[in-house]
């Protein structure tokens, strides 16, 4: 593979929909997103590849194999970005796949099984909710009607954006049947960088639970109300967060995660005890049993914190995504392929969701991570070192070739 | 005194600027406020009283005494209300003073010193900031120019509202010199009700310190960022609040108070570690030394909580009002007067500010509290029992007469 060519293509793609501070802005199915896809298709057509799209606008770029009767091996990711997104999230997985195709083309290598380079529609979920929609629709995990009905802030439906942009095609849902799916991605976290690891194989994705909590107390004047007469929902919420955090930090696997991304006081006044406090909670774990334990702890701590303060609490579960396990054979195969290049790479779970989660429900799936600077992603400052991009692409290439050529 | 007449006058006044749910809405210097003042003046004129107002619109209603050379004894409070205010906050103190005048008139009692019933302008601060403005201007603690320059949300200055409403007069600032100032008020807290006390004498007002805190951390994706890699400003803020609360609750006097009336995350996202969290803190104590100790603890805990999480914190002191001490002779006199009616009443500090705080800097001052239901105030549901209003008014009458007639 050609590291310079890969890097140049990453920069070329980033120039489509450039954002103010050096990132990219290609929201799903906008003119920029379509232009990015067109650039990819131009590159692929130059290699003699043909392509199709399905009703969800997912692109399948095919390089035929020697045995047309065998299921193809797929690589892929997404080209759409966050509103002020980076140049690597998703794009790396797609252009690494392109680099694999280019390398094979250049060296005139035929694989036993065909290869499919896939671009999934609306992975980010920034313009249309939910995220990972294209892969959801293709795998049948998200009903196509629901996918098409999602509307952006201007009220434009995903279906009409697809029609207007000409991205929808006639490939049947779930076609072609895949032999395996590989996705290279930046880690979007700080672990590989901190540990000095250039790559990792990903064996699954953390389970996630989302909650909305509302603590309801009694508003009171800050001055004349002694502490022991109060029913302060903010103090209950604070105690709850503090104690849940202790539980999370006490997790022996160190894999439990807690994020309170939002907290707000209704009708705030600096000299009044709040009446209503709302907050969101995101907990994650690599083990479903432990996640269930944290769920129970969360509810118990919310109730006990509220009771101690004499306030009410509602805990509303908003979303639950169980732990995803990727294919253990593929995990070993990727690790072995790295070993053959002299790298002993770690196995890790992904903290973020990816199209690979949907794919793992219909075909053997695995991911490869490379580090990104300071763990920063979903940000214009997102950056991955050229040598890490190249190493990850080489590993993708090796693993895909091995899979495609196996007996 | 006549309890029924007092209660009827309270209800009559509440009918001026009635609010949707049974409270009152007489924002300072609006037509409703002016109509309320006019009603009071009509009642006072019927007793043969004369009245003047000063440049701040404060009303001084005078009942002459036997010895014109002696300084008058004043009673008073305010008639303006919160936007959705109650019927007793401020109004009780004014109409109790009126009931004292009515009783003396009815019984044809002359006092040695003259009496002044004072209505302070813009006590609430809801329309014009700051609160307690009229008494601030009269005592010279708030420069008159600053008082007059305050503008409401429509951009109308207090000065022009005064001119338009005809409430400003020619009485010189600080005139007349007062022998003493008495203010009856609802407690605005739950203590008297909970303790079954019908009255209390108030020996001062808690010291207050206000702060704005900003915790600045590093935004990160909730999934891929392990807990020990995070710099989470919300967790720092939560730990800070939790620990400061422990310090407050450990105060041996049980007089320390902590209110976090507002907390917010900048650009919140449920699956992202926040970058910036802002919160307000209100701490109070009846002892300046202890308040200073809490101030130091607050700063130390903010810094240590931030350091533990690896985030930055700015602590901005917004306001500091030291402890106010009322006149100890008057406190004893009120307590003695209650004793003579068979009531052993407690001494307490006020948690809220009152015009009496300003007055205490220029003349011997004391307050009397009566309970209000559930401690609720600044709310249409605010309520005080008729018998408590009557008892407080009787005590005010007794104490004022004794003061006015002393040698």
Image: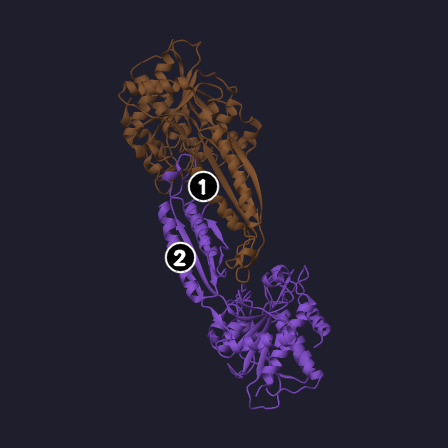
Chain colours: A brown, B purple
Q: Is residue A303 above or below residue A356?
A: below
User: Residue at 52% of width from left, 32% of height from top?
Assistant: A320
Q: Is residue A404 above or below residue B63?
A: above
Residue bearing the label numbered 2? B297
In the rendered image, is residue B167 in sight? no
The N terminus of chain A - image quarter = top left
Q: Chain of mark 1?
A: A
The C terminus of chain A - image quarter = top left
**How far is disc 1 from disc 2 in space, using C-alphas?**
23 Å
Category of crowding for the residue at label 1, using alpha-carbon neighbours closer than 10 angstroms: few (below 14), some (14–19), many (at least 20): some
Q: Along the line of sight, which residue is nearer the eye, B240 or B274? A: B240
Q: Are marks 1 and 2 on the same chain?
A: no
Q: Is residue A235 above or below residue B96?
A: above
Expressed as whole percent of the image width and height from the top left, the position of residue B385 reads 68, 65
Category of crowding for the residue at label 2, using alpha-carbon neighbours closer than 10 angstroms: few (below 14), some (14–19), many (at least 20): some
Q: Which mark is residue B78?
A: none
Position of residue A375 in the picture relative to residue B180 (left or right): left
User: Residue at 53% of width from left, 76% of height from top?
Assistant: B365
Q: Which mark is residue A245?
A: 1
User: Residue at 58% of width from left, 62% of height from top?
Assistant: B189
Q: Is residue B100 above or below residue B269?
A: below
Q: Along the line of sight, which residue is nearer the eye, B254 or B124? A: B254
Q: Along the line of sight, which residue is nearer the eye, B371 or A117? A: B371
Q: Along the line of sight, which residue is nearer the eye, B387 or B72? A: B387
Q: Chain of mark 2?
A: B
Q: Toward which corner of the image does residue B116 lie, by quadrant?
A: bottom right
């Amino acid at each position: 593979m050609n590291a310079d060519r890969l890097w140049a293509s990453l920069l070329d793609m980033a120039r489509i929909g450039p954002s103010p501070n050096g990132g990219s802005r290609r929201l799903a199915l906008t003119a920029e997103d379509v232009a990015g896809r067109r650039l990819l298709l131009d590159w692929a057509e130059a290699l003699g590849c043909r392509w199709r799209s399905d009703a969800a606008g997912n692109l399948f770029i095919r390089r035929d194999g020697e045995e047309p009767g065998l299921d193809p091996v797929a690589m892929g990711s997404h080209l759409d970005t966050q509103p002020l997104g980076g140049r690597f999230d998703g794009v790396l997985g797609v252009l690494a796949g392109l680099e694999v195709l280019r390398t094979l083309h250049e060296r005139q290598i035929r694989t036993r099984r065909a290869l499919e380079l896939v671009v999934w529609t609306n992975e980010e979920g920034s313009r249309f909710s939910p995220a990972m929609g294209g892969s959801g629709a293709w795998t049948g995990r998200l009903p196509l009607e629901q996918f098409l009905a999602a509307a952006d802030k201007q009220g434009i439906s995903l279906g009409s954006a697809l029609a207007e942009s000409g991205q929808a095609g006639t490939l049947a849902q779930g076609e072609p049947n895949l032999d395996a799916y590989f996705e290279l991605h930046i880690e979007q976290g700080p672990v590989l960088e901190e540990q000095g690891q250039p790559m990792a194989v990903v064996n699954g994705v953390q389970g996630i639970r989302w909650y909305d909590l509302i603590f309801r107390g009694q508003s009171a004047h800050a001055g004349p109300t002694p502490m022991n007469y109060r029913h302060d929902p903010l103090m209950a919420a604070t105690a709850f967060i503090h104690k849940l955090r202790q539980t999370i930090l006490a997790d022996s696997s160190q894999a439990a995660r807690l994020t309170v991304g939002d907290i707000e006081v209704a009708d705030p006044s600096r000299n009044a005890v709040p009446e209503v406090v709302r907050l969101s909670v995101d907990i994650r774990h690599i083990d479903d049993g432990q996640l269930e334990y944290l769920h129970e702890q969360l509810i118990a701590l919310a109730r006990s914190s509220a009771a101690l303060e004499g306030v009410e609490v509602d805990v509303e579960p908003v979303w639950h995504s169980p732990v995803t396990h990727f294919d253990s054979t593929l995990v070993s195969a990727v690790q072995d392929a790295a070993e053959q290049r002299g790298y002993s790479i770690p196995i890790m779970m992904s903290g973020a969701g990816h199209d690979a989660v949907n794919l793992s429900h219909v075909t053997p799936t695995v991911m490869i991570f490379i580090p990104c600077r300071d763990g920063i992603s979903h940000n214009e400052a997102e950056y991955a070192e050229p040598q890490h991009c190249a190493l990850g692409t080489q590993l993708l290439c090796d693993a895909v070739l091995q899979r495609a050529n196996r007996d």
